[in-house]
Image (spheres, grey):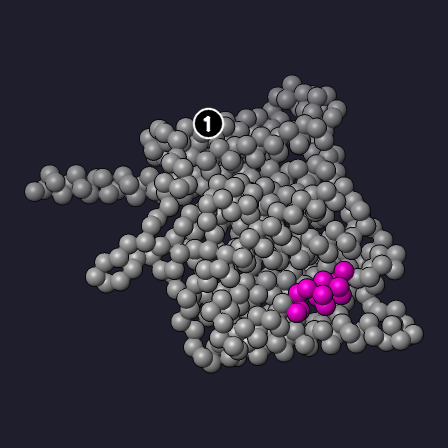
Amino acid sequence: MSTTIERGTAVHAAGTGSARAAAVRRFVGGSYLVMGGINAGIALADAETYRTFADGSFWSFVADAWQQVVMAHPLVWILLLAAGEVVLGLLLLRGGPAARVGWAGVLGFHVLLMSFGLGFWLWSIPVLAALVPTARADWPALTSAPPPVAARRRTPATSGTGPRTSHEALGPSTVWSSVVLAGCVVVASVYGLVAESPYRSLPEATVLGARAQDACSIVVAVLLLLVVRRASTTILLVRIGLLGYLTYSYLIYVTGVPMNRMFLVYVLIVGLAGSGLVSGLVRVLSRPPASSASSALTTGTGWMLVVTGILFSGLWLSALLPFALGGARPEPEGVGGTPYPVFWLDLAIVLPLVVLVGVLLLRRHRAAPALAVVALIKVVTLFTALWAGPLLSLATGAEVHLGPDAGPSLLLLAASTWLALRWLRSIDPRHPSTLEEGDPS
């Protein structure tokens, strides 16, 4: 009896350790994807940033090789380094024998990093002390390729206590397109933060707001990587809301920012995020999850969304109608007198959809709860980015510029955050997820 218990305890401990090591591996893999994007963005903005990288090396041949080889063509070499980081991240996320190659590459990378000077020892030694035992614990589980997504999908099962939780895994195309999307967002955002004049010809306040939005977009990219392997219904609704934020934000960059070196990256982001958003919404409408939201929450959220859509429509029209009738040009104004993109995006697409979701809630449409979560997540992310600009100005002592939507947006941010959390708790976790294998998002 005691032997059986000891064996069972040992197996349980081994399984727990292996699961913990796998979680760390996924975290490290995601971190390498993000770092690859950051290095690529910095290189595209100003590759000379890396000029002094090897100056602290113990060995002169390392410093000489860095200056004579790498910095002779810094953009090419740093982009290759970034690509290597991305490959290592993908290998770790892939699992199976590929992850063994990833672990070897990550550990070797940190050992090589130590040749660049004492400062890198202060980073590499603690990291290696943590990752070497983790890699050893994870190694035995990486003996075969991971099963295909379809084999990992959980199917509904019933018992005397009712249906079990049923979560369908994301298809491989969804996973990899999400990884590509997150990488593109990191590259574009870092470029906007580091480059000397990525937003030339724009007012100073607009440039500050764009860079604050870049910082928020990096956070959104990291969140997309964190949820890409999770298939619960609520997580997938959050994912659709994040895709809505990215689609909206980069449509503004595509149509309202002077063309810079990231233009094609912006276009790719809009394509990936937009297709994922549309695909997810179609599935929400075809298979809406159940919700236990109270009548008061449903009615209150419905009216808030309707009033919000009408309020912001009136706000933009108050700036546009006087100009249409012969008055002064509206503020803010787009580059070179072109229309400010927020005006047409909000009036033609976003605000009508917000009002529509509110009306569906009031009419108790069965898809309304899921759509409400998506709309509220989009509102929270958008206005968090909007308020990041003024907060950055306060932190740096710069002049704070607040638009006419500042007050309403702050109230809306607080209310939407609270409502989004309540709606997420109301979604039935037993309902199958709305995204299936083969989803192109």
Number of numbered tags placed on the structure image: 1
Closer to the camera, 293 or 195? 293
On screen, residue 382 above or below 228: below
Residue sitting at the far top: 61
Q: Residue at x 58, y 55 (%)?
A: 278
Q: Quadrant of residue 43?
A: top right
Q: Name the side, left or right, on which 336 lies relative to 398.
A: right
Determine the residue positioned at 74% across, 51% down.
254
Q: Is residue 262 above or below residue 354?
A: above
| Residue extending farthest left | 1
Report the front residue among 431 and 411: 431
Residue occupying the far front of the picture: 286
Residue type for callout 1: Val
The magenta segment: 341-352
Q: Residue drawn 66% across and 50% down?
A: 270
Residue 27 seen from this side: no
Location of mark 1 (residue): 101
Q: Is residue 105 left or right of residue 251?
A: left
Residue 31 lies, in percent from the top left, at 53, 42
Query: Residue extending furthest right?
Result: 326
Q: Please, what secondary structure does the residue beneath circle 1 have?
A: helix
Q: Residue at x 61, y 32 (%)?
A: 83
How far from the left and from the top, in percent, is residue 210? 72, 56
Viewer-nearest residue: 119 or 360: 360
Helix, strand or loop: magenta stretch: helix
Residue 343 sits inside the magenta stretch: yes
